[in-house]
Image: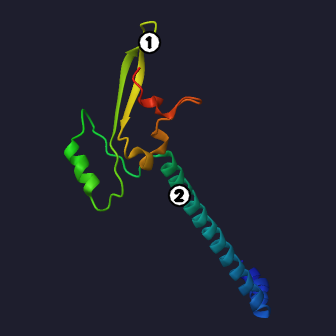
Amino acid sequence: MLALLRTFSWQELRHHPWRNAAAIVAVMLGVALAFSVQLINASALSEFSSAVRSTGGQPDLELRAVQGSFDEALYVRVAAHPQVAMASPVLEISTLAPDAAGMRKPIRIVAVDALVVAAVAPSLMPVPMQGVDRFALFAPE
């Protein structure tokens, strides 16, 4: 093996040093390019997922009670924190409700702060049916 190295590689390196240096630089640039593409791709995916979350109204941080209810004093403290840009309470419960036939069907009830929900979670805003007055949401039935 050393004889082969001495016969071919050493003579090639001695006669054409710039050719080998150019090959090494080309490999280094290829690795750097692949790494930079990987970094750009990861950054773009992160920004895209952040945009999708904010458009869909998904929060950056969510506080949930492990069991039972959530202490409202903690919400007030979190909302008043200087690093919190906007906080919105969401009350959520799963229960059963009777349908027209009297069968109990599972439903999920979500209650939001109507004054803040448009800025925080536009997807949770109530939307009236097509052709119905927009104030029909508030009409008693």
On the image, the x and y values in percent for residue 32 come to: 63, 74
Secondary-structure class at tag 2: helix
Q: Residues within 10 Å of mark 1 (few under 14, many from 20)?
A: few
86 versus 35 height, above or below: above
Q: Residue at x 78, y 89 (%)?
A: 11
Q: Nearer the viewer, residue 63 or 89?
A: 89
Displayed quadrant of residue 72? top left
Which callout, 1 or 2, points to the residue nearer the camera?
1
On the image, the x and y values in percent for residue 121 come to: 45, 45
Q: Which residue is mark 2?
A: 46
95 versus 23 height, above or below: above
Query: Mark on residue 99?
Result: 1
Whether residue 63 sits left or right of residue 102 in the image: it is left
Q: Residue at x 79, y 84 (%)?
A: 8
Q: Nearer the viewer, residue 28 or 141?
A: 141
Displayed quadrant of residue 42? bottom right
51 versus 101 height, above or below: below
Q: Residue furthest bottom?
A: 15
Q: Residue at x 43, y 50 (%)?
A: 119
Q: Residue at x 58, y 61 (%)?
A: 44
Cβ–Cβ below 8 Å for labels 1 and 2?
A: no
